[in-house]
């Protein structure tokens, strides 16, 4: 009867207040307001707005932002019908409902129905106050009236949707809908709506995950009443069972979302990731390490090299697995890249005119000062085509090319591609060709994206604003040569795709296994190894990482995205048809052993009429000792050149005198007519 007396007192108080309207309005207007800004957890979303990761609030609650527009309109209709029929017409307090509740309580000796409006419930939730005493109820009424003066009905309803309790540390409709039904509250079934309407009335005793029988009874009472009121059809009240499990909140791409939360700020962070692909690759990563022992881990990154968008980022095989070091983001860890830099070195050689895919290159014992590299298998193959040397990932040929290019130029090219290589010493040596530096998986994917996209290369990022243009790393011609070669690398068993150009790598001591590949749209990188850097016996990039990379391509897009067609300036010739300087690559050590013949102009012959291409004419020499000095009409235009050809630019149409001087001061010359 105490509650009945309380309702009676409140009803009399409301009637008395109505007599002094001005004084009453002033009393309401002077209400001390609670903080209306409600803390909600940070959300990281994918490219389509789907939830990748939700974070708890500072008080460890699952409370997510939501507006009226993001809720199923049918839920709102049923909520108001059940809780507060006159919500849109009253001023915060419903005298009719309060009088009815008071009368029912007085007649039955117990509370039959509540008299609180949704606005009064919001007032209670904002102050986290109870309703067990009449001063508390009066404060709740006063605050409800003040809220109605300051806020719109939609704003009040939004506050309820964010703060309504749903058991444990769940607050708000959206958190409850995700936890209990794994779905956003945009489209709910009638039984789901009824459960989510019933729960806030007694959130602990009706928790479906702990007290499913009580929850089922409460849900069915809501359904029965709504059917009885005509708000629902009888066929909507047919479910006799209850889904009783509480699910974990989405936590996709945990490493990347942790980083985004700390760097981006804001309550909602939008990324370029694809939640569906991310989920598939996380499952793939967890499966891939299963047979490799309890310490093996992996990382996978997928990017769209056309747009610069990171599509998926798997930092480890299991975020929570301490033995695998799952909390460490291996997409960011710098490790030895093994042989994965070889395509870039050959690409630079193509652009410098040193080699062509069909050029012959020597695979024999070589000494570069104190450095004497060996092939992985310890064998030597003699003269071999550049194409075959790269596909077989031979060490000696690529080191000899880097020796001509210079290690510093490779480091500069890596920086140009948007990476920051970590060097063991102050200066880069030839060993960097075989993995003697540190790069992360993200950086390797960045490098291959730049190779795949010679025009319009971009920095890869998961946040749109961080994607910026990069200068071209290789020409279209060199890029196409690389893709054409890598497309022919032998595939692992069961990898049927032919649209992927890829390279594998294994670091010294079998510590890191790599596979990086790209097609016409995507670039995917895979690292496998142990987080602590200890060796993985028998681990090779081709056997360990490559199969996983091809599986990742199938998960991203089963259909083919073919590599581009060859550009117009690509030389699609066999070795014998190549210009003589490109038929065979000459290393520095071979240059020192060249016969002491005077240099000779190999092309064009003296007196020839030569058409300019892009304003230049090409002159090639043979014999002589590098480096060379090139003179055009008596003036030096190129000095200290190790190349046996030069692109000379005449001032206009007419005769051009060309002279070349070798390192021993011997000269050769020709006079040609430039068209």
Image (spheres, rainbow, N blue to C red):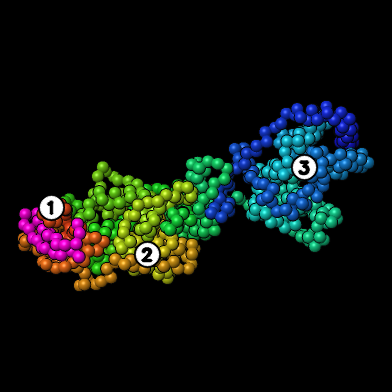
- Asked whether, in this view, residue 380 is left or right of residue 83, the answer is left
Looking at the image, which is closer to me, 6 or 65? 65
Please give the range of residues in magenta: 651-675
Would you call the spot at circle 3 few (<14 residues within 10 Å), some (14-19), or many (20 or more)?
many
Label 3 and label 1: CA atoms lie apart by 90 Å
Upstream in sequence: badge 3 or badge 1:
3
Does the rendering let one see residue 216? yes
Query: Residue 61: where, in percent of width, then height?
Result: 63, 41
Upstream in sequence: badge 1 or badge 2:
2
- Residue 635, label in figure: 1
Label 3 and label 2: CA atoms lie apart by 61 Å
Determine whether the residue tagged by mark 1 lies in a helix, strand or loop. Answer: strand
Q: Magenta stretch mostly in which secondary structure?
A: strand
**Residue farthest to the right?**
107
Q: Is residue 660 magenta?
A: yes
Looking at the image, which is closer to me, 72 or 53? 72
- Asked whether, in this view, residue 85 is left or right of residue 75, the answer is right
Q: Is residue 502 magenta?
A: no
Residue depicted at x 14% and y 56%: 632
Instruction: Report the quarter where the N terminus lies.
Output: top right
Looking at the image, which is closer to me, 334 or 359? 359
- Residue 501, label in figure: 2
Would you call the spot at circle 2 few (<14 residues within 10 Å), some (14-19), or many (20 or more)?
many
- Asked whether, in this view, residue 202 is left or right of residue 304, the answer is right
Reading the image, the residue beneath label 3 is: 118
Compared with 482, 473 (above or below) is above
Q: Answer with the quarter of the image where residue 229 lies.
A: bottom right
Residue depicted at x 36% and y 49%: 419
Instruction: Mark 3 and mark 2 in contact? Answer it, CB < 8 Å.
Output: no
Looking at the image, which is closer to me, 249 or 174? 174
Would you call the spot at circle 1 few (<14 residues within 10 Å), some (14-19), or many (20 or more)?
few
Compared with 454, 82 (above or below) is above
């Amino acid at each position: 009867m105490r509650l009945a007396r309380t309702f009676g007192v409140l009803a009399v108080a409301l009637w008395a207040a109505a007599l002094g309207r001005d004084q009453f309005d002033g009393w309401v207007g002077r209400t001390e307001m609670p903080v209306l800004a409600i803390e909600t957890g940070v959300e990281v979303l994918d490219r389509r707005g789907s939830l990748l990761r939700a974070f708890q609030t500072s008080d460890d609650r699952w409370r997510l932002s939501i507006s009226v527009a993001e809720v199923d309109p049918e839920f709102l209709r049923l909520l108001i019908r059940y809780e507060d029929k006159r919500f849109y017409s009253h001023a915060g307090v419903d005298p009719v409902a309060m009088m009815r509740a008071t009368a029912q309580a007085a007649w039955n000796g117990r509370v039959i129905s509540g008299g609180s409006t949704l606005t009064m419930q919001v007032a209670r939730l904002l102050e986290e106050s109870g309703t067990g005493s009449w001063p508390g109820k009066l404060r709740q009424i006063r605050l409800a009236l003040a809220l109605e003066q300051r806020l719109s009905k939609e704003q009040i309803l939004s506050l309820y949707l964010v703060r309504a309790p749903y058991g444990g540390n769940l607050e708000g409709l959206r958190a409850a809908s995700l936890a209990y039904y794994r779905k956003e509250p945009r489209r709910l079934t009638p039984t789901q709506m009824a459960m989510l309407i019933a729960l806030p009335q007694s959130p602990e005793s009706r928790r479906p995950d702990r007290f499913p029988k009580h929850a089922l009874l409460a849900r069915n009472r809501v359904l029965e009443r709504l059917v009885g009121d005509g708000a629902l059809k009888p066929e909507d009240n047919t479910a006799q069972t209850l889904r009783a499990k509480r699910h974990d909140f989405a936590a996709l791409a945990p490493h990347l979302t942790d980083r985004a939360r700390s760097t981006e700020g804001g309550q909602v962070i939008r990324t370029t990731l694809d939640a569906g692909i991310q989920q598939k690759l996380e499952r793939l990563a967890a499966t891939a390490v299963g047979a490799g022992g309890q310490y093996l881990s992996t990382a996978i990154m997928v990017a769209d090299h056309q747009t610069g968008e990171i599509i998926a980022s798997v930092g480890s095989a299991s975020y929570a697995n301490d033995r695998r070091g799952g909390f460490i983001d291996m997409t960011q860890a710098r490790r030895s890249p093994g042989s994965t830099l070889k395509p870039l070195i050959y690409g630079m050689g193509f652009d410098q005119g040193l080699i062509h895919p069909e050029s012959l290159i020597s695979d024999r014992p070589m000494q570069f000062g104190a450095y004497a590299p060996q092939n992985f298998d310890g064998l030597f193959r003699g003269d071999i085509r550049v194409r075959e040397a790269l596909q077989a990932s031979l060490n000696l040929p690529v080191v000899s090319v880097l020796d001509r290019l210079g290690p510093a130029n490779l480091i500069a090219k890596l920086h140009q591609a948007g990476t920051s290589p970590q060097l063991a010493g102050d200066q880069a040596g030839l060993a960097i060709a075989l993995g003697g530096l540190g790069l992360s998986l993200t950086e390797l994917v960045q490098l291959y994206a730049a190779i795949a996209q010679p025009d319009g290369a971009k920095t890869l990022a998961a946040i749109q604003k961080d994607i910026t243009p990069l200068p071209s790393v290789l020409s279209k011609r060199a890029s196409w040569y690389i893709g054409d070669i890598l497309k022919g690398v032998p595939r692992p068993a069961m990898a049927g795709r032919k649209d992927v150009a890829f390279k594998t790598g294994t670091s010294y001591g079998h510590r890191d296994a790599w596979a990086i590949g790209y097609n016409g749209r995507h670039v995917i990188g895979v690292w496998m190894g142990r987080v602590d850097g200890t060796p993985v016996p028998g681990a090779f990039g081709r056997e360990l990482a490559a199969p996983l990379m091809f599986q990742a391509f199938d998960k991203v897009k089963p259909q083919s995205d073919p590599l581009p067609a060859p550009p117009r300036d690509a030389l699609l010739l066999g070795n014998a048809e190549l210009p003589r300087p490109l038929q065979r690559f000459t290393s520095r050590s071979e240059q020192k052993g060249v016969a002491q013949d005077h240099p000779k102009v190999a092309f064009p012959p003296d007196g020839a009429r030569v058409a300019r291409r892009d304003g230049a004419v090409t002159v090639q020499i043979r014999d002589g000792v590098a480096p060379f000095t090139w003179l055009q009409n008596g003036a030096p235009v190129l000095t200290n050149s190790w190349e046996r050809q030069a692109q000379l630019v005449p001032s206009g149409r007419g005769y051009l005198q060309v002279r070349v001087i070798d390192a021993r001061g011997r000269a050769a010359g020709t006079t040609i007519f430039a068209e």
